[in-house]
């Protein structure tokens, strides 16, 4: 099912998905190219081993790949419902992961930025996705 053109919730969801993709790309490229610069810019603890930055770089590349998987949810949130739901669930789970890492695993409080960013995007996207589904299915 494709969202109708007059569904404002679908347009708002598409804007938030696009914002999430932009945030992912804006974080992933610096992580992949220069993880030291990003950790210092965000006041995160430095990597203790000079070879450990390969893991941070791979996270940047994986984040780019993950953000490319959100594109179907951006184009048509209802046509690919599973991908849209998975994109929203991944945002929520990433937010919970970062919150858990700081709260229970004793990581730096600087990582709360990621928890708040991912979590708030996930909650807003989930609310809009439910509104999109309700509006489309109540019309039928």
Image (cartoon, rainbow, N blue to C red):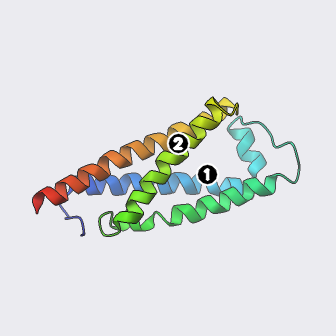
> In the rendering, at what x and y percent does residue 27 appear?
61, 51
Please tell me which residue is depicted at 75% across the width and 50% down the height of the picture: 35
Please tell me which residue is depicted at 68% across the width and 56% down the height of the picture: 59
Q: Residues within 10 Å of mark 2 (few under 14, many from 20)?
A: many
Q: Quadrant of residue 74?
A: bottom left
Give the secondary structure at mark 2.
helix
Task: Name above or below for residue 36 compared with residue 104.
Answer: below
> In the rendering, at what x and y percent does residue 91 appear?
48, 49
Find the residue positioned furthest to the left.
140
Find the residue positioned furthest to the right.
50
- Locate residue 90 relative to residue 43 in the image: left or right: left
Instruction: In this rendered view, identify the residue nearer to me: 110 or 104.
Output: 104
Quarter of the image with the N terminus is bottom left
Q: Disc 1 or 2, which lies upstream in sequence? A: 1
Marks 1,2: beta carbons within 8 A = no
- Locate residue 5 relative to residue 124 in the image: left or right: left
Give the secondary structure at mark 1.
helix
Q: Is residue 42 visible?
A: yes
Task: Name above or below for residue 41 compared with residue 77.
Answer: above
Residue under pointer 1: 27
Tell me the mark number nearer the camera, choosing from 1 and 2.
2
Residue under pointer 2: 95
Q: CA distance from mark 1 to mark 2?
A: 15 Å
Instruction: In this rendered view, identify the residue nearer to me: 90 or 67.
Output: 90
Please tell me which residue is depicted at 51% across the width and 47% down the height of the picture: 93
Task: Name above or below for residue 105 compared with residue 7.
Answer: above
């Amino acid at each position: 099912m494709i969202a109708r053109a007059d569904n404002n919730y679908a347009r708002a969801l598409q804007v938030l998905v696009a914002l999430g993709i932009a945030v992912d790309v804006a974080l992933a490229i610096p992580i992949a190219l220069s993880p030291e610069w990003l950790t210092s810019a965000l006041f995160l603890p430095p990597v203790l081993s000079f070879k450990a930055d390969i893991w941070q770089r791979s996270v940047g590349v994986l984040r780019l790949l993950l953000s490319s998987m959100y594109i179907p949810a951006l184009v048509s949130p209802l046509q690919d419902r599973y991908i849209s739901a998975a994109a929203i669930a991944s945002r929520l789970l990433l937010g919970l992961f970062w919150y858990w890492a700081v709260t229970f695993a004793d990581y730096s409080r600087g990582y709360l930025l990621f928890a708040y960013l991912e979590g708030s995007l996930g909650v807003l996207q989930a609310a809009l996705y439910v509104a999109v589904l309700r509006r489309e299915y109540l019309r039928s």
